[in-house]
């Protein structure tokens, strides 16, 4: 993907807020099971860094005292970790069958048309990355879109897509 | 016990057995890829599906527990259909590039595809291509061939103790890889090559050098450590092409270290000495054997006559064979009382004559796996004894309390019960604390000399583990053996063993250390005395005294000062101090015998013909003996030599010859040293003349150039910065190195590895050093 | 807003908006009375399990396993940790019921889990929440804080000496983590790769300790059962299919959403609740239990009642109660292509038939859909699906195979038409009209 981004973010250190957030997660698990917090740790590092660079993955692994490769396995297994740089806004449209029956695919087409990019591409200005999503567990809300992993947008008509994209600067 | 019937054959198996276990016992072959008896069960390849009565679907034999009365069919229609289905899936994305694959001919997938595959593929879609990975100098990859059995990953996690490889991504995008930019650096990594059932992981040094069916397979024994790993050497045109483990559950199980596996490259290398050579007027000339032998014999004879045999000495590597050492000892004796030693790294010989026998492991190797508690004192365990470390690691996984008392906090990749890391001079104090804790725990009077030491929590916890029920051991490693007060440390450890009831053992150094002691290869002056005695003539056998001795510069000076130095080696070595080089066979080119740390006698044949004019050293020594007209050299075969040397023992040294108990030795006391103390190790690939010349090993992480390593705090105190160029000064000599921050080094210490020409000038392996920025 | 409050609802009862999730509202609705009853009336674990058995509650996660029986597998006098785990990793295409439970009624799940913890002697629980519904994870954390503050979880609950700690763990985008052992691996901080069973979680579960895993809706049913008795719950449904069940209806209906109805309700009645077929088009096919369940033609479906046994008899499964409704504008090849793509994307990759087979299936269906099918493809598809089903570590292999086999079984002519004519039987314009972005129902 975008080479310039990866160069800028070569080094990474967990900031204080991230470390505190990871500590809170570690406390949920029995003693000696800090590794259980790796999923949350990677999410937190991703939030801090914008994406999960190898350095960010290693920082989480080091912080939890687990092998870097163990963290890498997790980071590359779950879809919502971005192990490649993404735009400021990651737009994920569910196109799975239940959503597709109520316009999921057409919503995706419309977003592609508006942004001028296909799935797994980033707009040249680095603002948007578009992805195709698998079932989000909200099929009744089709078409459904998730922005930056945490913001769920339901019933995305063309008008609501217009409004959403306008809002995301 | 549970009863099971497989393909009509009945059998009783212990509770907890799987169908695969039962089939193995019956000798019924069930096809499989992911299953491996030494690894955890993954049940992911699905090749071992069998039909189980009353089960609605086929079950994987490797993971299905036997239930009483179970009836299994491995070749029924249901089973075979399932197996064929799996085989088809495995092949759809496999490149089927067997003609150019190094695994061709020994590939489980290839073998099984013949039986279970169909000739034409129904798969018409595009095949997957997977990028290859750079795993370092030892393992080559062809990841498109990978069948995702995860044996390599499980090996790393479970046997090597470190997760270097993992399976990243998901689904059909899953790929075996290391963390970005990392290589596989485990000292056991080559075993992954053996474990890989296809040609995804193959040997990099071996790559494309032969087809497996062109290779003949011969058995031998590794010289590199005192385990004596059993090897299969694969040979083509009289050259060693590849080395694999020969399975021996009692010794190396089915593993070998990378040192055992890749050292052979040195034997085919440029540095081999293939003609006898003598130095005349400062120039080296190739000569024939007759000339060289006469030259050598005359040199020895002249010194014996003119200076007396006491001015003749022999320094032999502890991986010389029983036969070589026995004849060498005969020769030295025959000359009228010349000296000989193999304990080149030792500097304290006060135990000589006081031990109840030859220092040894104190138990069978296999028993190490069955220990309930172990304390390892002064060892670079993983690098000194990779497979003993592996056994202890497996034991620790099962709950054995393994503790470490040493001079380096390096990660042993196992869960330790307790760990104490101190400067070499403080080992005595820590051992004394253990002795005190043990005496207190037993409620007996404190032995004299330990009354005033402080006992730490860690010490108490180690002692507690050593006093529990079950089998317990204390192992003394290379640091103790090389220590300036080795005898005093021994005395403390022996007392600790007595008080706790643990067995005392030595992790002896060198493939034939026990054999050397058994055949009288340590006679007359010891190595250190010899070097201080003004030798006029010296024979060097397989060793490189300028790297191998406890005080390398002293050795070098002594050799340079001698009138005649005869080097018997497979390599061109010692050119600046020798005047005669005799090309003798490395272990692959001679028959011979090693006695390992447990006293196991292992004889082997030559696996290839000697290179060039090289001759087996035992034969060279035999000729020298005859030329010098000494008695006792009339042997027709190496077997005759062995039988005489070992008084007919073929399998084990008699136990009475072995013994780790010493009488009347004073406890060591901690010493106060000014300045910084040296911590020295012989890195795994700098440990003997062979490994030092193996190119792939030289490129491994463990061969990184030596540095002055100290903890951040110690460097800070000394006002030194990481990466700085520093001058390190010993008592008499010095060298220049880069400073490296390494927090595994105890406070107040500098770790400077031995076995390197760069660091050899430093002299003794322990003692005070000064370090200053340049 | 979907329509949570349907007739006879017990899980979604009294929920009329986003403000219902807090503990105050929950208590007003009678919340935590069941936990109180259990602890204060001195109900024994055995009595609780007996009550759950009587209720004939079957697991709502998909397999429909009797919950009381599952609970009885937990070792009694196990000295060390035991765990109760809630599966809120709802990601089975078509399923979105757990979301509404967590959105509007998280304390119901907390209460159900605490009772389960008491019944099985577990002092710790985790709720694994699907990553994509992030706000529910945050809400659940808040609800946990409320419950902790009110003394319903934590140490010495209600002063009765019962300790139960409960935490939330979020997924991060992997359907397979809905499989219970993959979920455990995921909580343990690993890839979500299912474990081979046996050993089952009841003996070797989270961190190797005895563990019971149930679906969100299953736990949510527990307080009502305790409050009203197992028999009352059973009576809401039909024999062997106790209680009400939440159905998530998606696809070509006028009001997609969640509907809590008694098990055994006729499918046409459910369809009617959803406002009937969109645009008045004809019902073509229904996947009655989430995308992993075999598809059934519309006419077969119209004769079914919505319960485990009836749907099984018709050749499919009630699964998670996700009803995907397809009308005549639907191209079955394209629909299968999308589902096959999903399983191929979501296979965890560890076992051979699923890792290799799901990609093979998808590529074949994709080829057919794109006009490159060959006559023998249909038989190959069916046979490859058979080679996956029943040969894998977990049921994802089956889940990938069933749609393929059932789509071909019931709609073979449509597939053959595709192969022969290299295009859809249903004209593309009709398909587009049928699946037009549809948001009208959202207004309500
Ligand atoms: C591939 C796969 C996905 C699954 N996804 C879910 C899920 O999202 N939610 C769920 O509750 N159960 C899911 N299950 C079923 C669980 O494995 C398990 O049976 C269930 O959580 C048990 O709870 P129950 O007895 O209450 O139904 C899935 C199973 C498989 C094989
Ligand atoms: S069936 Fe698929 S998802 Fe399940 S274990 Fe096998 S590869 Fe993983
Ligand atoms: S050997 Fe049993 S599944 Fe691989």
Image (spheres, helix red, strand yellow):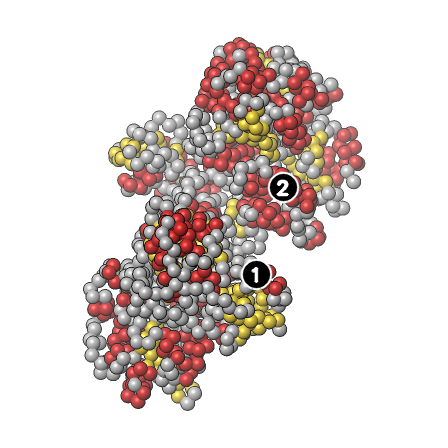
Where is residue B385 drawn, in percent x and y? 40, 58
Density class for disc 2 (Cα within 10 Å; few <14, some 14-19, many ≥20) is many
Q: Which residue is mark 1?
A: B711
Are tags 1 and 2 found on a single chain? no
Q: From this viewpoint, is residue C414 visible?
A: no
Q: Quadrant of residue C18?
A: top right
Residue B549 position (above or below residue C105): below
Q: Judge: label 1 CB < 8 Å from ligand 2.
A: no
Density class for disc 1 (Cα within 10 Å; few <14, some 14-19, many ≥20) is many
Where is residue B588 drawn, in percent x and y? 33, 66
- Local SS, label 1: loop
Q: Quadrant of residue C86?
A: top right
Q: From this viewpoint, is residue C166 visible?
A: yes
Q: Which residue is mark 2?
A: A22
The residue under the point 50% across, 49% down is B163
* Relative to B440, A154 lies left or right: right
Q: Which marked residue is nearer to the observer: mark 1 or mark 2?
A: 1
Where is residue B720 drawn, in percent x and y? 62, 66
Looking at the rendered structure, the number of numbered marks drawn on it comes to 2
The residue under the point 27% across, 80% down is B337
- Give the quadrant of the N terminus of chain B: top left
Residue B338 position (above or below residue C83): below
Q: Please say if the residues under marks 1 and 2 sit with CB atoms less than 8 Å apart.
A: no
- Local SS, label 2: helix
C-alpha distance separating marks 1 and 2: 29 Å
Q: Which chain hosts label 2? A: A
């Amino acid at each position: 993907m975008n080479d310039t981004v990866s160069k800028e973010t070569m080094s990474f250190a967990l900031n204080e807020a991230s470390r505190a957030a990871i500590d809170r997660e570690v406390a949920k698990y029995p003693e000696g099971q800090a590794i259980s917090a790796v999923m949350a740790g990677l999410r937190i590092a991703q939030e801090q860094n914008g994406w999960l660079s190898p350095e960010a993955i290693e920082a989480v692994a080091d912080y939890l005292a687990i092998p870097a490769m163990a963290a890498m396995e997790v980071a590359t297994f779950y879809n919502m970790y971005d192990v490649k740089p993404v735009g400021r806004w990651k737009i994920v449209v569910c196109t799975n069958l239940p959503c597709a029956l109520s316009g999921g695919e057409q919503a995706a087409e419309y977003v592609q048309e508006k942004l001028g990019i296909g799935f797994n591409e980033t707009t040249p200005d680095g603002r948007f990355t578009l992805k195709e999503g698998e079932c989000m567990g909200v099929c009744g809300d089709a078409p459904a879109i998730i922005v930056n992993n945490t913001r769920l947008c339901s019933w995305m008509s063309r008008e609501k897509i217009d409004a959403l994209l306008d809002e995301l600067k | 016990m549970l009863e099971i019937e497989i393909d009509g054959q009945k059998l009783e198996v212990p509770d907890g057995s799987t169908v695969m276990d039962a089939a193995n016992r019956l000798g019924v072959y069930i096809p499989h890829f992911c299953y491996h008896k030494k690894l955890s069960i993954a049940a992911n390849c699905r090749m071992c599906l069998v039909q189980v009565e009353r089960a609605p679907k086929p079950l994987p034999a490797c993971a299905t527990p036997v239930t009483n009365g179970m009836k299994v069919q491995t070749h029924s229609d249901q089973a075979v259909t399932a197996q064929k289905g799996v085989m088809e899936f495995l092949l759809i994305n496999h490149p089927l590039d067997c003609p150019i694959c190094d695994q061709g001919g020994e590939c489980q997938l290839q073998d099984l595809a013949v039986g279970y595959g169909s000739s034409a593929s129904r798969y018409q879609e595009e095949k997957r291509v997977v990028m290859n990975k750079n795993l370092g100098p030892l393992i080559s990859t062809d990841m498109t061939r990978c069948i995702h059995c995860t044996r390599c990953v499980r090996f790393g996690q479970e046997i090597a103790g470190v997760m270097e490889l993992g399976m990243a991504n998901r689904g059909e995008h899953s790929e075996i890889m290391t963390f970005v930019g990392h290589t596989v650096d485990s000292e056991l990594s080559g075993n992954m090559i053996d474990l890989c059932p296809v040609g995804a992981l193959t040997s990099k040094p071996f790559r494309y050098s032969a087809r497996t069916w062109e290779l003949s397979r011969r058995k031998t024994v590794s010289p590199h450590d005192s385990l004596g790993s059993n090897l299969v050497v694969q040979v083509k045109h009289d050259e060693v092409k590849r080395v694999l483990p020969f399975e021996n559950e009692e010794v190396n199980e089915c593993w070998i270290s990378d040192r055992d596996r890749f050292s052979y490259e040195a034997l085919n290398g440029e540095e081999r000495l293939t003609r006898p050579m003598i130095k005349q007027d400062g120039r080296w000339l190739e000569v024939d054997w007759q000339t060289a032998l006469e030259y050598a014999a005359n040199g020895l004879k002249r010194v014996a006559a003119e200076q007396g045999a006491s001015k003749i000495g022999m320094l032999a590597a502890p991986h010389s064979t029983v036969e070589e050492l026995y004849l060498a000892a005969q020769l030295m004796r025959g000359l009228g009382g010349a000296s000989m030693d193999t304990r080149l790294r030792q500097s304290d010989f006060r135990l000589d004559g006081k031990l109840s026998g030859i220092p040894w492991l104190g138990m069978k190797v296999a028993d190490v796996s069955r220990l309930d508690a172990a304390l390892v004192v002064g060892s670079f365990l993983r690098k000194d004894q990779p497979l003993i470390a592996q056994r202890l690691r497996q034991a620790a996984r099962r709950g054995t309390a393994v503790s470490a008392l040493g001079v380096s906090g390096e990660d042993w990749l196992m869960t330790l019960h307790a760990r104490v890391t101190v400067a070499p001079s403080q080992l005595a104090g820590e051992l004394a604390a253990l002795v005190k804790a043990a005496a207190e725990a037993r409620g007996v009077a404190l032995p004299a000399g330990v009354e005033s030491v402080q006992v730490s929590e860690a010490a108490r916890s180690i002692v507690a583990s050593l006093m529990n029920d079950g089998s317990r051991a204390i192992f003394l490693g290379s640091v103790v053996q090389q220590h300036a007060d080795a005898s005093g440390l021994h005395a403390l450890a022996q007392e600790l063993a007595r008080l706790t009831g643990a067995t005392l053992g030595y992790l002896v150094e060198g493939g034939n250390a026990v054999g050397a002691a058994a055949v009288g290869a340590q006679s007359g002056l010891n190595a250190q005395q010899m070097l201080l005695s003004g030798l006029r003539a010296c024979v060097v056998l397989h060793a490189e005294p300028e790297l191998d001795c406890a005080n390398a510069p002293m050795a070098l000076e002594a050799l340079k000062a001698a009138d005649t130095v005869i080097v018997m080696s497979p390599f061109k070595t010692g050119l600046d101090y020798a005047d005669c080089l005799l090309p003798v066979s490395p272990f692959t080119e001679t028959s011979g015998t090693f006695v390992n740390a447990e006293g196991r006698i292992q004889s082997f044949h030559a696996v290839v013909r000697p290179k060039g004019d090289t001759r087996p050293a035992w034969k060279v020594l035999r000729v020298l003996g005859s030329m010098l007209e000494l008695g006792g050299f009339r042997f027709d075969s190496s077997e005759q030599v062995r039988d005489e040397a070992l008084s007919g023992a073929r399998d084990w040294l008699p136990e009475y010859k072995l013994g780790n108990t010493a009488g009347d030795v004073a406890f060591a006391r901690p010493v106060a040293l000014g300045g910084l103390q040296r911590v020295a190790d012989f890195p795994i690939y700098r440990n003997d003349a062979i490994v030092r010349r193996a190119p792939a090993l030289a490129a491994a992480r463990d061969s990184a150039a030596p540095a002055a390593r100290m903890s951040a705090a110690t460097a800070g105190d000394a006002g030194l910065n990481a990466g700085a160029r520093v001058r390190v000064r010993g008592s008499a000599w010095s060298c220049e190195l880069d400073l490296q921050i390494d927090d595994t080094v105890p406070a107040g210490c500098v770790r400077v590895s031995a076995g390197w020409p760069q660091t050899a000038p430093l002299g003794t392996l322990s003692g005070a050093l000064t370090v200053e920025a340049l | 807003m979907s329509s949570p409050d349907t007739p006879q609802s017990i899980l979604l009862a009294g929920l009329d908006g986003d403000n219902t999730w807090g503990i105050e509202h929950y208590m007003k609705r009678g919340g935590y009375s069941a936990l109180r009853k259990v602890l204060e009336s001195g109900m024994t674990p055995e009595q609780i399990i007996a009550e759950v058995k009587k209720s004939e509650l079957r697991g709502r996660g998909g397999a429909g396993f009797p919950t009381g029986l599952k609970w009885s597998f937990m070792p009694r006098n196990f000295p060390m940790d035991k765990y109760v785990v809630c599966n809120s990793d709802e990601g089975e295409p078509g399923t979105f019921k757990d979301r509404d439970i967590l959105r509007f009624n998280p304390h119901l799940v907390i209460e159900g889990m605490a009772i389960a913890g008491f019944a099985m002697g577990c002092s710790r629980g985790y709720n694994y929440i699907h990553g994509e519904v992030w706000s529910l994870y945050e809400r659940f954390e808040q609800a946990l804080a409320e419950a902790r503050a009110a003394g319903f979880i934590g140490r010495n609950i209600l002063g009765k000496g019962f300790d139960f700690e409960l935490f939330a763990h979020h997924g991060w985008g992997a359907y397979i983590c809905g499989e219970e052992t993959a979920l455990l691996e995921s909580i343990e901080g690993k890839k979500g790769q299912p474990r081979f069973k046996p050993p089952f979680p009841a003996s070797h579960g989270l961190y190797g300790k005895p563990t019971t895993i149930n679906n969100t809706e299953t736990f949510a049913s527990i307080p009502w059962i305790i409050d009203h008795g197992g028999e009352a719950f059973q009576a809401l449904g039909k024999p062997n299919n106790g209680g009400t069940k939440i159905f998530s209806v998606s696809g070509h209906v006028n009001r997609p959403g969640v509907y809590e109805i008694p098990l055994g309700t006729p499918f046409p009645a459910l369809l009617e609740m959803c406002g009937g077929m969109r645009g008045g088009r004809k019902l073509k096919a229904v996947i009655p239990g989430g995308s992993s369940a075999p598809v059934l033609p519309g006419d077969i479906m119209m004769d079914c009642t919505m319960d485990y046994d009836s749907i099984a008899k018709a050749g499919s499964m009630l699964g998670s109660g996700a009803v995907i409704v397809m009308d005549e504008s639907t191209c079955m090849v394209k629909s299968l292509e999308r589902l096959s793509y999903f399983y191929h994307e979501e296979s965890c990759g560890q076992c051979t038939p699923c890792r290799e087979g799901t990609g093979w299936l998808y590529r074949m269906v994709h080829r057919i859909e794109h006009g490159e099918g060959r006559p023998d493809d249909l038989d190959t598809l069916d046979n490859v699906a058979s080679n996956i089903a029943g040969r894998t570590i977990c049921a994802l292999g089956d889940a990938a195979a069933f749609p393929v086999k059932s789509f071909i079984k019931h709609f073979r002519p449509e597939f053959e038409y595709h192969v022969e004519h290299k295009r859809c039987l249903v004209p593309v314009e009709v398909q587009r009209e049928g699946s037009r972005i549809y948001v009208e129902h959202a207004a309500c």
